[in-house]
Amino acid sequence: FADGKVQSYMLSAYSARRLNMQTTGNAGGARNVRITAPLTSLDEMLKQMGTGVLVTELMGQGVNGVTGDYSRGASGFWVENGEIQHAVEEFTIAGNLRDMAANLLAVGDDVDTRGSIHSGSWLIDGMTVAGMSEDEELEG
């Protein structure tokens, strides 16, 4: 991405030939990928979020590769006024990959380099959060 726009795709040799594009050597999925962006601290990302959910764990598989629809079970922390209030669990986050990429506001400086995909946390605006009752949000 540059200025919020896709600059290239991860393509296997087969996909690249079909699209008349250059391969990136990513047959079999995303490997050896590093997301580069201006990095933001978690505290600053929470302040920018204001009120929302800090997701710390995702469960299940819920990505439609054809439509880009995304839906996963999650757990994490409820955030108000840029500060973590309490833990929340057994809720669902949903969106569309295209919209999620377009609404990416910040990338965290908490890059985990133990695997083959290197990226910090993502602050995404406008995702749907479902499954938390108002009581859970207010009382934890």
Image (tube, grey):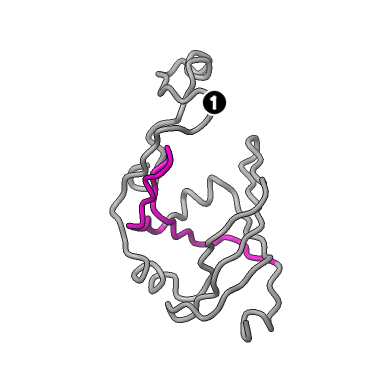
Q: Quadrant of the N terminus?
A: top left
Neighbor class of circle 1 (other Cα within 10 Å; few <14, some 14-19, many 20+) is few
Q: Quadrant of residue 109?
A: bottom left
Q: Please count the marks in the image.
A: 1
Residue 111 inside the magenta-drawn segment:
yes
Q: Could you say where residue 13 lies in the image, as x and y percent from the top left?
A: 48, 16
Q: Which residue is mark 1?
A: 28
Q: Could you say where residue 128 lies in the image, as x and y percent from the top left?
A: 62, 62
Secondary structure found at label 1: loop
Residue 129 inside the magenta-drawn segment:
yes
The residue at the point 65 percent across, 35 percent down is 66
Q: Is residue 73 left or right of residue 16?
A: right
Q: Quadrant of the C terminus?
A: bottom right
Asked if residue 134 is positioned above or below residue 22 in the image, the reply reads below
Q: Which residues are magenta?
A: 105-130
Q: Could you say where residue 73 lies in the image, as x and y percent from the top left?
A: 66, 57
Nearest the viewer among 117 and 128 is 117
Q: Could you say where residue 36 lies in the image, as x and y percent from the top left?
A: 32, 45
The residue at the point 65 percent across, 39 percent down is 67
Q: Is residue 1 left or right of residue 133?
A: left
The residue at the point 37 percent across, 35 percent down is 7
Asked if residue 94 is positioned above or below residue 65 in the image, the reply reads below
Asked if residue 16 is positioned above or below residue 104 in the image, the reply reads above
- Specify the farthest residue to the bottom: 139
Asked if residue 17 is positioned above or below residue 112 in the image, the reply reads above
- Specify the farthest residue to the left: 38
User: What amino acid type is highlighted by mark number 1?
Assistant: Gly
The residue at the point 57 percent across, 58 percent down is 57
